């Protein structure tokens, strides 16, 4: 009995220690088709494509890796689109290097355009579907407003659009003096370390991240729940893997998106000299939000419909039962809500 208990304790510590060196991975076969600066464009070829418009997924850039779009064989947004016959592309945003520290929002929108142009060149199709998750959602909206002629439909999931539409801890944090954020960037010599962002997320639910989840792991080991342990390790490996962001990009997000709420103010955000106006969006739009999302409350996401020109009959609102991450990659959301998204896109010409 004592030996068995010791073995469980050792395995517990081995798992905790292994998570100090998390790694990035993809679950579905793919290949890199384009790379420039912090952009790496991956194509996930559909083994049975059916001449549908390709889908470009923009994962969030919040210090984590973009494989949230292809988290596991069972939890893969890429594979949901595959089941409906779509060819899928994903922007894998790379960890910023010192030479990238002065890249800003404008640079990332222009890199997104490079990705779209590469897809259009390869497929010969004039328009594509664009899907943005969280931060990638407002980036997709900004891109569509600037290049509406290139987008067939816009899907945004758990994306902050009007940050004043509902209170949230994220907005509270953003109201701290700008010198605090500048200091964090300065400690990274012009780069924002993803570990700082991760600590911020953890501090929103400290009991969960600093105590409860470790108790869950011990309870699963005690009960011999190997599937539960495997799920724990996979999630923590993704969650703890962090990347660096260009300091300018991070500071502009804090200032423009969360402090000034610029997305809903026509012309307040400028890209290559052109003011961003969400009214330029007139294509079919699907907006997804999570009922339990404490990072992007549903009102912040659904506010998009009030600032675009898309007719009401071409706007679909989907409220998931999950929270922020659950909306993006939870089993229930992928099975039900993202399936609905695909069925809607099949109707878009």
Image (tube, rainbow, N blue to C red):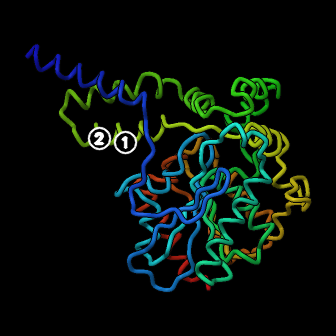
Q: For the residue carrying disc 1, how many other residues have a C-alpha within 10 Å: few (<14), some (14-19), or many (20+)?
A: some
Q: For the residue carrying disc 2, how many other residues have a C-alpha within 10 Å: few (<14), some (14-19), or many (20+)?
A: few
Instruction: Determine whether the residue tagged by mark 2 lies in a helix, strand or loop.
Output: helix
Q: Report the residue marked by disc 1.
A: 234
Q: Is residue 206 above or below residue 299?
A: above
Q: Residue at x 74, y 67 (%)?
A: 144
Q: Position of residue 75 (x, y in %)?
A: 39, 56
The quarter of the displayed image where residue 188 is located:
top right
Point out the residue furthest to the top here.
2
For the residue pair 327 and 65, the one nearer the viewer reads as 65
Viewport quadrant of the C terminus? bottom right
Instruction: Determine whether the residue tagged by mark 1 lies in a helix, strand or loop.
Output: helix
Viewport quadrant of the N terminus? top left
Could you give the CA–CA distance between mark 2 and mark 1, rounded to whole angstroms? Answer: 6 Å
Please indicate whether residue 308 sits to the left or right of residue 4 in the image: right
For the residue pair 115 and 37, the one nearer the viewer reads as 37
Q: Position of residue 246 (x, y in %)?
A: 71, 40
Q: Report the residue marked by disc 2.
A: 230
Please indicate whether residue 192 sits to the left or right of residue 41 in the image: right
The quarter of the displayed image where residue 205 is located:
top right
Q: Position of residue 314 (x, y in %)?
A: 67, 77
Q: Are the residues flagged by discs 2 and 1 in contact, CB closer than 8 Å?
A: yes
Q: Is residue 98 above or below residue 39?
A: above
Q: Is residue 217 above or below residue 128?
A: above
Q: Residue at x 55, y 50 (%)?
A: 291
């Amino acid at each position: 009995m004592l030996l068995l208990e010791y073995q469980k304790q050792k395995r517990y510590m081995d798992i905790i220690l292994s998570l100090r060196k998390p790694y990035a991975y993809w679950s579905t076969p793919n290949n890199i088709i384009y790379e420039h600066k912090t952009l790496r464009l991956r194509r996930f070829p559909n083994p049975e494509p059916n001449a549908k418009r390709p889908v470009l997924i923009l994962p969030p850039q919040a210090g984590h890796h973009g494989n949230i779009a292809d988290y596991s064989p069972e939890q893969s947004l890429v594979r949901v689109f595959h089941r409906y016959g779509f060819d899928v592309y994903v922007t894998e945003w790379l960890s910023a290097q010192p030479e990238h520290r002065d890249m800003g929002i404008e640079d990332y929108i222009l890199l997104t355009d490079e990705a779209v142009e590469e897809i259009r060149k390869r497929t010969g199709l004039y328009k594509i579907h664009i899907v943005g998750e969280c931060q990638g959602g407002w980036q997709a909206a900004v891109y569509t407003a600037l290049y509406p002629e290139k987008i067939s439909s816009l899907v945004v999931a758990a994306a902050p659009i009007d940050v004043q539409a509902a209170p949230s801890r994220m907005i509270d944090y953003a109201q701290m003096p700008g010198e605090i954020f500048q200091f964090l960037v300065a400690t990274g010599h012009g780069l924002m370390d993803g570990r700082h962002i991760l600590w911020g997320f953890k501090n929103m639910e400290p009991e969960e991240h600093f105590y409860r989840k470790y108790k869950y792991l011990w309870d699963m080991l005690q009960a011999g729940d190997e599937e539960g342990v495997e799920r724990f390790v996979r999630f923590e490996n993704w969650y703890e893997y962090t990347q660096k962001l260009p300091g300018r990009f991070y500071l502009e997000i804090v200032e423009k998106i969360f402090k000034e709420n610029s997305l809903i103010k026509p012309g307040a955000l400028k890209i290559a000299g052109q003011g961003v106006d969400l009214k330029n969006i007139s294509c079919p739009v699907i907006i997804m939000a999570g009922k339990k999302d404490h990072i992007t409350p549903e009102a912040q996401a659904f506010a998009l419909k009030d600032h675009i020109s898309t007719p009401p009959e071409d706007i679909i609102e989907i409220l998931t039962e999950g929270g922020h991450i659950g909306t993006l990659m939870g089993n229930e959301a992928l099975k039900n809500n993202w399936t609905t998204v695909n069925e809607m896109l099949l109707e878009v010409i």
